[in-house]
Amino acid sequence: MLPNKALQRAVLRAAAERQDVAVISMDIQARYLIFHSALVLLAGLLVGVPYGRAVHRNAPDQVIKAWRLAHDTLTLGPTLGLVIAAVLSSLTVDAPIKSWLAWTWVVSNYGFCFSLPLAAMVGQRGRTLDKPLSNQLVLVGNMVGLGASSVGTLVLLYAAYVSLP
């Protein structure tokens, strides 16, 4: 933004008079979504290190696939969060709907950020509630990520439909 608060207000006031304030302002929900997406994106990029090491040391195929899944998902999910943040301020829905939309994607990204690297580290897939505890934790993280992203998709669909002209 601009270095001087008075200058910022003057620019916002001028933009409001020209009715292009949407170009300058961004909803608080979008800002939080950007921040949390950036954190998970960083985690996804860092997960590329053990993925590269697994490939380099010729680890078993299952290990390589687990790290690849973690790396790919933890870069794609936050990228989708950034895209949603970019359009969030343009949606003509109330703040609670925008909050639901933003926070479901944040929760989804963190759920997968927990479960996928854990799955790669412990060699569990988390498809059932069977022991060991690490398998159960992977399952819970995956369900949190899946559930939140499913709700987020439905909220996005609703917000996009309501925002149609």
Image (cartoon, rainbow, N blue to C red):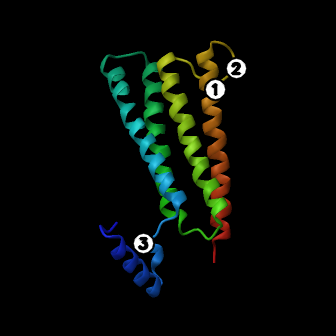
Tell me the distance, in whole angstroms, between the alpha carbons under discs 1 and 2. Answer: 7 Å
Hey, what amino acid is under mark 1? Leu
The residue at the point 63 percent across, 52 percent down is 153
The residue at the point 53 percent across, 23 percent down is 119
Q: Quadrant of residue 44?
A: top left
Q: Earlier in the sequence, mark 3 or mark 2?
A: 3
- Where does label 3 land, which residue? 24
The residue at the point 62 percent across, 71 percent down is 92
Hey, what amino acid is under mark 3? Ile
Residue sitting nearer the eye, 110 or 124? 110
Q: Earlier in the sequence, mark 1 or mark 2?
A: 2
Q: Earlier in the sequence, mark 3 or mark 1?
A: 3
Please tell me whether mark 3 or mark 2 is closer to you in this view.
Answer: 3
Task: Describe the element under mark 3 as helix, strand or loop.
Answer: loop
Q: Residues within 10 Å of mark 3 (few under 14, many from 20)?
A: few
Task: Describe the element under mark 1 as helix, strand or loop.
Answer: helix
142 to the left or right of 28: right
Hey, what amino acid is under mark 2? Leu
Answer whether labels 1 and 2 touch (C-beta < 8 Å).
yes
The residue at the point 37 percent across, 78 percent down is 11
- Where does label 2 land, which residue? 129
Q: Position of residue 68 (x, y in %)?
A: 43, 30
Tell me the distance, in whole angstroms, between the alpha carbons under discs 3 and 2. Answer: 48 Å
Q: Is residue 147 above or below residue 103?
A: above
- Where does label 1 land, which residue? 139
Q: Position of residue 118 (x, y in %)?
A: 51, 23
Q: Is residue 64 above or below residue 36?
A: above
Quadrant of the snapshot with the C terminus: bottom right
Q: Position of residue 162 (x, y in %)?
A: 68, 69
Q: Residues within 10 Å of mark 2 (few under 14, many from 20)?
A: some
Q: Position of residue 111 (x, y in %)?
A: 57, 35
